[in-house]
Amino acid sequence: MSEPKGGKPTAMWGGRFEGQADELFRAVNDSLGVDWELVQQDIRGSIAWAHAIGGAGVLTPDEVSKIESALKELAKDAEAIPSPPLSSGAEDVHSWVEQELTRRIGPLGKKLHTGRSRNDQVATDLRLWGVEQCDRRVTEVRALQRSLVALGTKHASDPIPGYTHLQRAQPVTIGHWALAYVEMLARDVERFEFARAMAARSPLGSAALAGTTFPVDRVALASRLGFREPTRNSLDAVSDRDFALDLLHASSVCAMHLSRLAEEMIIFATGEFAFITLDDSVTSGSSLMPQKKNPDALELIRAGVGRALGNYTNLLTLLKGLTLAYNKDMQEDKPPVFDSMRRLSILLRIAARVIERTTFNLQTCERAAKGGHANSTELADYLVEKGVPFRDAHEIAGKLVRQALAKGCALEDLPIETYRQHHAQIEQDVFQRMTLEAVLARRDVLGGTAPARVRDALGVWRSALGMA
């Protein structure tokens, strides 16, 4: 690019203006420090655009080849730059790429922007980035699922209390517990796949807002970039950030699921529960209290949802009042998207490590699963099989629970005579029905916690996740 006497590159839009931009305005306006994240995508899009305008007769085949070669070399050089090259004076990543291209191949570099606007350029870059990030998040979610499936396989039959209202409800297996989060994460994969599909549409050729005047093949251009199709309306294409909202929605829900997992594990790791022991590598100590082992990794995972939701709200609010087509407000779309995806990547990876290194204290879990009269529903079901209406059976079981509480004993420790005071058809076999093993085994329905069903479900997931 040409340089004025001051030595700074001329802005891409500088012809209509005199003098230099105010330094404070540049501090607000320039975005290279943020959108440098998109440098590789900008170069990919630029190579594709060179071929498109070559096909439209704007560039010769030789010119396309020279531009492509120079841009590929630039992509390699950019990978080696550790931080945004702010000293270049470039306003944004697009002007930096054009500036560097022109420095390398001369005036030919100035031809590349023919028929293109930064409006469709940045939309393309962000969509390319979004597609790549969705693929990476899916890979990371799958890795966490594998960690949970491995944990579940190890403990497919081992009991742990199941809770409602954070009160002991019915026993389940640790494998069943782990599979609950596998299913949550499976829905996260679907959301990221949806977000990917929404991002995989090419705006290139929309120009500033009305469409380019050059006869580029937008279908071929979309295909070259790996998009599934071009966008269908140029006004919408340059102003649409719904795909970014989809990314943030998927990130927010996934972060919420991680927060739920972290919260349960934090509770399980307390001295009061003592269901699990967290590995030293993902915990910290206290600067004052020598005995402390704090679940810091889990607490930071739990905190992540606040940041994700804040970023989602940020972008929703930014977009809500914008008129068509592009507005400079949209320059602020990238920080929340970049932050959420970057942070979620870290949280997914550390969550997998926490799971892989957690030890379940099986005797404590089993003792807790037997407590709290969690087998009272089984007693009610037993009575139903004797012909007692469920509401009556529920009341009888409740009364027996009250008697057990009064005696300070387990439900199955009450004598058979006490049971028969409530219903004459209760037999000695009721005690076998209320054992922990029987309570678990009888939940033998699709999706139930019976160990056989849990092993079947784990087998399905092991196959789906490519586990041996």
Image (tube, rainbow, N blue to C red):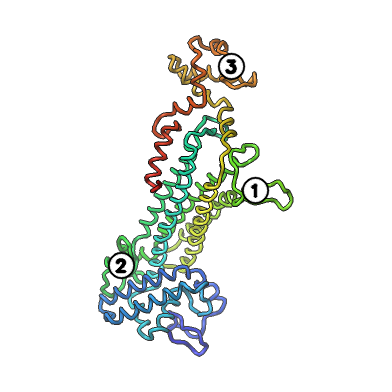
Q: Nearer the viewer, residue 290 or 133?
A: 290
Q: CA distance from mark 1 to mark 2?
A: 50 Å
Expressed as whole percent of the image width and height from the top left, the position of residue 291 reads: 71, 46
Task: Look at mark 1 in the image and give the residue it sits on.
Answer: 294
Expressed as whole percent of the image width and height from the top left, the position of residue 255 reads: 50, 50
Name the mark nearer the viewer: 3 or 2: 3
Instruction: State the SS at label 2.
Output: helix
Place residue 133 in its image quadrant. bottom left
Task: Look at mark 2 in the image and give the residue it sits on.
Answer: 224
Q: What's the amino acid at mark 1?
A: Asn
Q: What's the amino acid at mark 2?
A: Arg
| In the depicted structure, whether residue 40 falls above or below residue 311 | below
Task: Look at mark 3 in the image and give the residue it sits on.
Answer: 414
Q: What's the amino acid at mark 3?
A: Leu
| In the depicted structure, whether residue 331 falls above or below residue 463 | below
Q: Residue at x 41, y 33 (%)?
A: 453
Q: Nearer the viewer, residue 181 or 394?
A: 181
